[in-house]
Image (cartoon, helix red, strand yellow):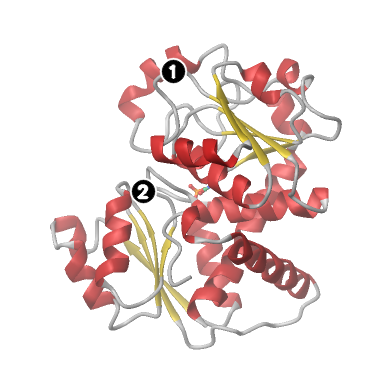
C-alpha cells in the first residue's frame, strides 16, 4: 500500500495491520511511552473544506510521532488560483514526506498520487472518507472483540461515509445493510462489488436495515458542499432516515451507535440516542488520532 485514496486500496490484511498498530500506539500513549517513528518527517495537510477532527488529529498525531505537520489551506495555496494539481503534486513532493488532502473531487486525490512521488492520504472527498472508517473499525473491534460476522447498518445518505463503510465493513468480515432514500444510493460500482460479496443488502426500509444490527451508523443529510440542496434533502430524508429509539429497538442487545460527526440532532439522529451512545461516539472521534498515526507510520516510515 503506497497511498490511502479510498478503502479499496487496502486489503483485509492491510486494514487489520493498521488496526493492530493503532491499538499499540493508543496503549503507548495512555502509558506515556513515546513513539517517535516519524522523527523529522513532514506532512502537508491540504484543506479545501472545513474540519475539526481531521485537522487536529493529523497535526497532533504527527507531533506525537516526532514529525511536523503543515496546514495548507486550499484558498491560500496557488491551487486555489488555478495552479494544476499535477504541478502542485510535483512541487510538494520535493519538500514533504506525505500529504493529507481534504477536497471535493476524488479525481484530484488520485491525480495528486499519480503525479506526486510521496504517500497521499485522503482526508475526505465526496466519494470517500477512509481515515474515518479506520477509526470506526478500530472502535467497533475494541468494544466487540472482533469484526467478523457482525452486522453494520448504515441509515442515511449514500455518500462518502456510506461508500467507505461498505468497503471497510465487507473487507473485515462484517455484514453490511444500507437504508437510503431513492436517488441517494451509494456509488454504483461499490454497490455492485458489495453485492458480489453476498454480505450486503440495500433497502429503502430503515427498520429492515436495523434488524439485528450490532452497530448502527448514520451521517448528515446534507454534506459539505451540498448546502444549497438542504431543503430538498430534508424532504427526502425527514421523518424516516433517522436513528431514533424506535429504530434502536430492532437492533441486537448491546448495539453500538457510531457517527463520524458533526451530528445534527433532530435530523439524522435524535438527542436521546446520541447522548445514550456518547461514550462510543467520542471514543470513535478519539480513535481518529490512533488510527491515523498507525496509517502514517505504515505509509511514511
Ligand atoms: N469526522 C470528520 O472528518 O470530522 P471533521 O470534518 O471535523 O474533520
Ligand atoms: N458526509 C459528511 C462527513 C463529514 C465528516 C460530509 O462530507 O460533510
Q: Viewed as shown, does residue 126 lie left or right of 202?
A: left
Question: Assess mark 2: CB under 8 A from ligand 2?
Answer: yes
In the picture as drawn, the residue positioned furthest to the left comes out as 82
- Give 224 or 171, whichever is nearer the viewer: 171
**Mark 2 Cα shell of 10 Å, populated few (<14), some (14-19), many (≥20):** some
The residue that label 2 is drawn on is 49
- Which residue is labeled 1 in the image? 182
What secondary structure is found at the residue carrying circle 1? loop
Eyeballing the image, is 228 above or below 280? above
Q: Nearer the viewer, residue 246 or 199?
A: 199
Answer whether labels 2 and 1 touch (C-beta < 8 Å).
no
Q: Alpha-carbon distance for marks 2 and 1?
A: 27 Å
Choose between 298 and 103: the one closer to the eye.
298
Asked if one can make out residue 44 in the rendered structure from this viewpoint, the answer is: yes
User: How many numbered tags mark residues here?
Assistant: 2
Residue at the extreme right of the image, as rendered = 253
Quarter occupied by residue 202: top right
Residue drawn at (43%, 12%) of the image: 235
Q: What percent of the width, then of the height, locates residue 148?
A: 74, 49
Question: For the residue labelled by badge 2, is the local secondary structure a helix, a strand or a loop?
Answer: loop
Residue 85, percent from left and from top: 21, 63
Q: Residue at x 70, y 31 (%)?
A: 274
User: Given the current orientation, which residue lies at the most extreme bottom position?
Assistant: 40
Please tell me whether mark 2 or mark 1 is closer to you in this view.
1
**Does the beta carbon of the residue at mark 1 sit less than 8 Å from ligand 2?**
no
Amino acid at each position: 500500500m503506497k497511498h490511502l485514496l479510498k478503502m479499496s486500496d487496502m486489503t483485509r490484511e492491510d486494514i487489520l495491520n493498521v488496526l493492530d498498530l493503532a491499538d499499540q500506539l493508543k496503549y503507548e500513549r495512555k502509558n506515556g511511552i513515546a513513539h517517535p517513528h516519524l522523527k523529522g518527517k513532514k506532512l502537508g495537510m491540504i484543506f479545501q473544506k472545513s474540519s475539526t477532527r481531521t485537522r487536529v488529529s493529523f497535526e497532533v498525531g504527527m507531533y506525537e510521532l516526532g514529525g511536523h505537520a503543515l496546514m495548507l489551506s486550499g484558498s491560500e495555496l496557488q491551487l486555489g488560483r488555478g495552479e494544476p494539481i499535477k504541478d502542485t503534486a510535483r512541487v510538494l513532493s520535493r519538500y514533504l514526506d506525505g500529504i493529507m488532502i481534504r477536497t471535493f473531487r476524488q479525481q484530484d486525490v488520485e491525480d495528486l498520487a499519480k503525479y506526486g512521488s510521496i504517500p497521499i492520504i485522503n482526508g475526505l472527498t465526496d466519494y470517500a472518507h477512509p481515515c474515518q472508517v479506520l477509526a470506526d473499525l478500530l472502535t467497533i473491534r475494541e468494544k466487540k472483540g472482533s469484526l467478523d460476522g457482525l452486522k453494520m447498518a448504515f441509515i442515511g445518505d449514500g455518500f462518502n461515509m456510506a461508500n467507505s463503510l461498505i468497503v471497510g465493513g465487507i473487507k473485515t468480515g462484517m455484514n453490511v445493510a444500507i437504508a437510503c432514500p431513492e436517488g441517494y444510493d451509494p456509488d454504483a460500482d461499490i454497490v455492485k462489488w458489495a453485492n458480489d460479496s453476498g454480505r450486503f443488502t440495500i433497502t429503502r426500509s430503515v427498520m429492515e436495515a436495523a434488524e439485528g444490527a450490532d452497530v448502527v451508523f448514520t451521517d448528515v443529510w446534507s454534506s459539505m458542499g451540498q448546502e444549497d440542496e438542504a431543503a430538498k434533502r430534508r424532504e427526502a430524508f425527514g421523518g424516516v432516515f433517522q436513528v431514533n429509539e424506535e429504530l434502536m429497538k430492532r437492533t441486537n442487545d448491546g448495539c453500538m451507535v457510531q457517527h463520524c460527526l458533526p451530528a445534527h440532532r433532530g435530523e439524522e439522529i435524535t438527542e436521546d440516542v446520541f447522548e445514550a451512545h456518547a461514550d462510543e461516539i467520542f471514543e470513535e472521534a478519539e480513535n481518529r488520532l490512533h488510527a491515523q498515526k498507525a496509517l502514517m507510520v505504515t505509509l511514511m516510515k
